Amino acid sequence: MLDYVKGMLVAAEPNYAVIDTGGWGFKLNISFNTYNSIKSYLHEQVKLYTHLLIKEDAIELVGFYDKMERETFLLLIRVPGIGLKVSMSMLSLLNVSKLKSAILSDNSSVLASVPGVGKKTAQKIIIELKDRIKDLPIDSQKDVESDALYEVKRALESLGFKSNEIQAVLNEYSVSGISGESAEEILKKTLKKLSK
């Protein structure tokens, strides 16, 4: 029904974001990982993938930085007893890759480290999702790369570069791949490009 919301990010907090699309302000529940991905785009255009959650007493709009996080959320809320709050806590404290790894390796203690998830609930998540989550195409190398790009972005912002300049340079890395380069190596290269 509502695949994504695209517009100006007018507010961003660790658990929600408000996006203005032509005078309509959409308030979306978000994970801490999504917050980290969008917080530097305040008063700029952003796009969040969405899921509309209809409950007996409320209608909640949930936003995700990428489709993979949304797919994981949809798997989590299908588990009996797991609702919006616990699902978002899990996606906030564990990224999608760590969550998949914990489920596939039967590591209930990692899942139980999330507030609201006890040992029994963690085991229930593993039983319910083990066969379903294995097909999620998560690339652990890509996670390492996106972490490195995020570090570089923060470092460049602290040096006073504008976010649109930084994003233009970092997009080249996202497209071409960074083949295991460290954040330090990428930072040196991006500084050279931005200083031209």
Image: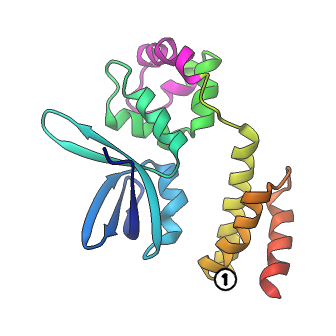
Which residue lies under the disc numbered 1? 161
The answer to which of 150 and 62 lies nearer the viewer is 62
The answer to which of 188 and 44 lies nearer the viewer is 44
User: Quarter-wise, where is residue 21 in the image?
Assistant: bottom left
Is residue 65 a member of the stretch shown in magenta? no
Number of marks drawn = 1
Q: Name the magenta segment's main secondary structure.
A: helix
At a point 57% along the width and 40% down the height, the residue shown is 95
The vertical placement of 97 against 28, above or below, is above
Q: Residue furthest bottom?
A: 196
Residues rendered magenta in the picture? 110-133
The vertical placement of 127 against 3, above or below, is above
Q: Position of residue 36 (x, y in %)?
A: 53, 58
Q: Position of residue 48 (x, y in %)?
A: 44, 55
The answer to which of 14 and 97 lies nearer the viewer is 97
User: Quarter-wise, where is residue 194 in the image?
Assistant: bottom right
At a point 56% along the width and 21% down the height, the residue shown is 109
Would residue 179 appear left or right of 127 to someone viewing this image? right
The N terminus is located in which quarter?
A: top left
Q: Position of residue 116 (x, y in %)?
A: 37, 29
The vertical placement of 76 against 22, above or below, is above
At a point 79% along the width and 54% down the height, the residue shown is 177
**Circle 1: element type:** loop
At a point 26% along the width and 66% down the height, the residue shown is 25
User: Quarter-wise, where is residue 196 in the image?
Assistant: bottom right
Label 1 Cα crowd, 10 Å radius (few <14 / some 14-19 / many 20+): some
Q: Position of residue 171 (x, y in %)?
A: 70, 65
Is residue 125 a member of the stretch shown in magenta? yes
Q: Residue furthest left?
A: 57
Would residue 6 appear left or right of 153 to someone viewing this image? left
The answer to which of 84 and 114 lies nearer the viewer is 84
Q: Amino acid at mark 1?
A: Phe
